[in-house]
Image: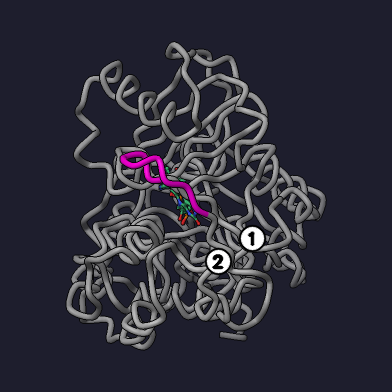
Amino acid sequence: MQKTAHIIGAGISGLSAGVRLANAGYTVHVHEATQQLGGRCRSYYDAATDLVIDNGNHLLLSANHHVLAYARSIGSEAGLVGPDRAQFAFVDIRSGQRWLLDLGNGRLPLWVFDESRRVPDTGLGDYLALSPLIWAATSKTIGDTIPCKGTLYDRLVQPLLLAALNCDPPEGSAGLAGAIVRETLLAGGQACRPLIARDGLSGVLIDPAVKFLEGKGGSVRIGRELRGLDQAGGRVTGLKFGDETVALGPSDVVVLAVAPRPAMALLPGLTGPTKYRAIVNAHFRITPPKDAPALLGVVGGLVEWLFAFPQRLSVTISNGDRLVDMPREELAAAIWADVCKAAGISAELPPWQIVRERRATFEATPEQNALRPGAKTAFGNLALAGDWTDTGLPATIEGSVRSGDRAADLLLGRG
Ligand SMILES: Cc1cc2nc3c(=O)[nH]c(=O)nc-3n(C[C@H](O)[C@H](O)[C@H](O)COP(=O)(O)OP(=O)(O)OC[C@H]3O[C@@H](n4cnc5c(N)ncnc54)[C@H](O)[C@@H]3O)c2cc1C
């Protein structure tokens, strides 16, 4: 008998669940409420810069094995590009000091023993002081666990954990930070190579998944908001889309891969994070200097990471709630001033765009982390996915794909 899976939400979590179920023989139908696919991970044409931009600059690492396997499944792994060695260029825009953190490409973090590869002005003891984070309890904050001050903190720990958790590190969950440290820094340079979807998030992570699912007889539809569920005998028996109710057969399965709020409205009694943090991205239409690294860590200013794309410089600022109500022109000018210092250029403000994602991620504090549910629900044929479900990781693409894989495995009886 033909087995059918319905995926609610066309973000990375839903699409990865769909790809896994399609690979297991299901015909997959994806239903997306909005007019665009990809959720918080998508590209679009921006008239202000006359460029296709991503809603946010997304950085992946070679440790993100589930993302890489997903990209391999849909034939787009080559679109995730990065250097052979895990090297990260940094600048402190207060002093102008520049350095290269060279994590190498080995399986052990041996770089900490080599002064020339470490963060400047740090010693081995500074790195050993981070060890309590490795297996920290989920109830602890990072501030309770490691010293949140000093040169190593300012130049590496703070930028890394701020980017990974999207909250001020001292208040962040030490358990989530520990998972990041175990999977990346502790696993050596081979796990830390930066990877970027240089030709755009949609072209690498979204559109090929849609093509893959359609090629296997499935469908991906926009403007299809799930409004309610019919249920009987511990199973979901119908999906209500407003204008239409889709009746489910006895072997049909559903993955609910929407944000916490709609999930909790559809499944009364479900708990999930209730607090979010913003991420601010700025895009400037300018040809980057020839020697500009693809990714530059920026310390001592408003800008945190500077990405160089063929025709633009783009900036990420995490934990950006303080910036969401600032006038756009003022914000663009302030960010551009930092970009000029970081990139070593002097130019008038070029065409720009600011993208402020107010609910970019759930707040990665111990309190909010404790609210995350697993994939299992009260219904035998319905599983939950989403970066906000209990993946053991902060809200990341890797966490999203893991949640999608786990939801699919549960429905396939492999969970
Ligand atoms: C600006 C920004 C920068 C980021 N940077 C990074 C980064 O550098 N590295 C990294 O790994 N991660 C990063 N992330 C996080 C990453 O984008 C997310 O973890 C991931 O995209 C979440 O995917 P998701 O599928 O879980 O959720 P979403 O993308 O939110 O997808 C949920 C989908 O469900 C749809 N939906 C909601 N309700 C319904 C309904 N009732 N019926 C049908 N559809 C519905 C929504 O419209 C949406 O399309 C960043 C996020 C942002 C916003």
> Residue 179, percent across and down?
43, 77
> Residue 123, percent across and down?
39, 76
Q: Which amino acid does label 1 sit on?
A: Gly
Q: Which residue is drawn at 56% across and 29% down?
A: 53
Does 97 lie within the magenta span? yes
Q: What quarter of the picture does the C terminus occupy?
A: bottom right
Does 168 lie within the magenta span? no
The reply to whether callout 2 and callout 1 are in contact (CB within 8 Å) is: yes
Q: Residue at x 46, y 73 (%)?
A: 235
Residue behind mark 1: 18
> Disc 2, ligand 1: is the CB inside 8 Å?
yes
Closer to the camera in the image, 186 or 173: 186
Residue behind mark 2: 404
> How would you rate the neighbour count of disc 1 (Cα within 10 Å): few for under 14, some for 14-19, many for 20 or more?
many
Kindly indicate the quadrant of the structure image that contains residue 71: bottom right
Whether residue 266 appears in this view of the structure is no
The magenta span reads: 92-99
